[in-house]
Image (tube, rainbow, N blue to C red):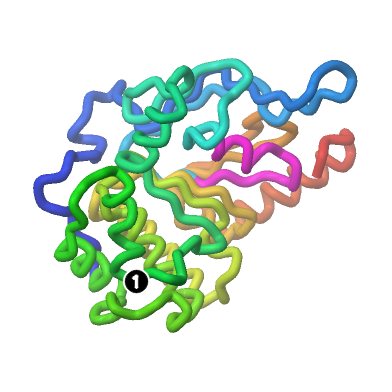
Amino acid sequence: MALRRAKNTRRTTADAAPAHDWAVELRGVRRQYGRGATAVHALRGIDLTLPRGSFTAVMGPSGSGKSTFLQCAAGLDRPTDGSVRLGGTEITGMSENKLTELRRSRLGFVFQAFNLLPSLTVEQNVVLPMRLAGDRPDRRRAAELLAQVGLAGKGDRRPGELSGGQQQRVAIARALVTSPDVIFADEPTGALDTTTAAEVLALLRDAVDSLGATVVMVTHDPAAAAHADQVLFLADGSIVDALPRASMAQIAARMTALTARGRLTGVAA
């Protein structure tokens, strides 16, 4: 079943916004840990704009800066220098309280570990972002989303009663419940088998195509990245390459070349 846009929610599709109204915008973003000779430069001046209603995969060798990129872009970490804007809102200088409010109301998150609360039912996990944002939980919206991700009638179950793939479907429903500006996914299929991973990726793809959602996904898997509109490749804290609408074979070949180049030049791999 295709995902459907919630009624009376803000529009996030590319055609609902001016061409310059980006979902994600990074300007000169650097992230440095430590100082002096021992300083680690996790990000080295990232400049990037991602349009609304797009699916972007981020890949790179271990130590390339993928996780730091996601954390800075999602407001989970603060860059040392530079600017981050989400849905046209500058977040770099926000207070922690304002940033927390923005993450709860305007962003969705899907992680490898699912991060479902075992003491809550499936439905309660789905509507949790609404509660945290101070809104009244919409049980009808939760039921609709659960049906759309293939979990109709399971709202009263506990996460421990579900398979790993089903738990990740709950996490996707939770990420969609507030109709967020951007969904950030960190290795969302890393703990799943190949068949279940493909089903979860199809849901993320459908969220973009049917709902106009914007997805930014960090992954090590070329098969996962092949679902995206574009693949960005990071190495040593910089974006070094990009592929639009690439096949799994093309992505794997590019990653192999990038990793080999890192070994030859001494870049962390």
| Residue 233 placement: quadrant | top right
Q: Residues within 10 Å of mark 1 (few under 14, many from 20)?
A: many
Q: Residue placed at 24% from the left, 55% from the top?
A: 210
- Would you say 82 lies left or right of 66 here? left
Q: Quick check: 150 above or below 250?
A: below
Query: Horizontally, is 30 left or right of 105 in the view?
Result: right
Depicted 130 relative to depicted 155: above or below: above
Q: Residue at x 45, y 64 (%)?
A: 116
- The magenta span reads 57-71
Most foreground residue, 79 or 56: 79
Identify the residue shown where x is 66% and y is 32%.
Answer: 240
In this rendering, the count of numbered labels is 1
Along the viewing direction, whichever of 131 and 197 lies nearer the viewer: 131
Apparent side of residue 255 relative to residue 219 in the rendered image (left or right): right
* Residue in front for this viewpoint, 242 or 269: 269
Pick the quarter of the image with the N terminus: bottom left
Q: Is residue 159 magenta?
A: no
Quadrant hosting residue 120: bottom left
Q: Nearer the viewer, residue 15 or 155?
A: 155
> Picture coordinates of residue 144 (x, y %)?
19, 67
User: Is residue 222 depicted above or below 101 in this figure?
Assistant: below
- What amino acid is found at the position of numbered circle 1 in the picture? Val
Q: Residue at x 59, y 35 (%)?
A: 69
The image shows residue 93 at horizontal and vertical percentages of: 46, 17
Q: Is residue 249 above or below residue 149?
A: above
**At which x and y percent is residue 223?**
56, 62
Question: Which residue position is annotated with label 1?
Answer: 122
Query: Could you say whether the residue bearing mark 1 is in a helix, strand or loop?
Result: helix
Q: Which quadrant does the C terminus fall into?
A: top right
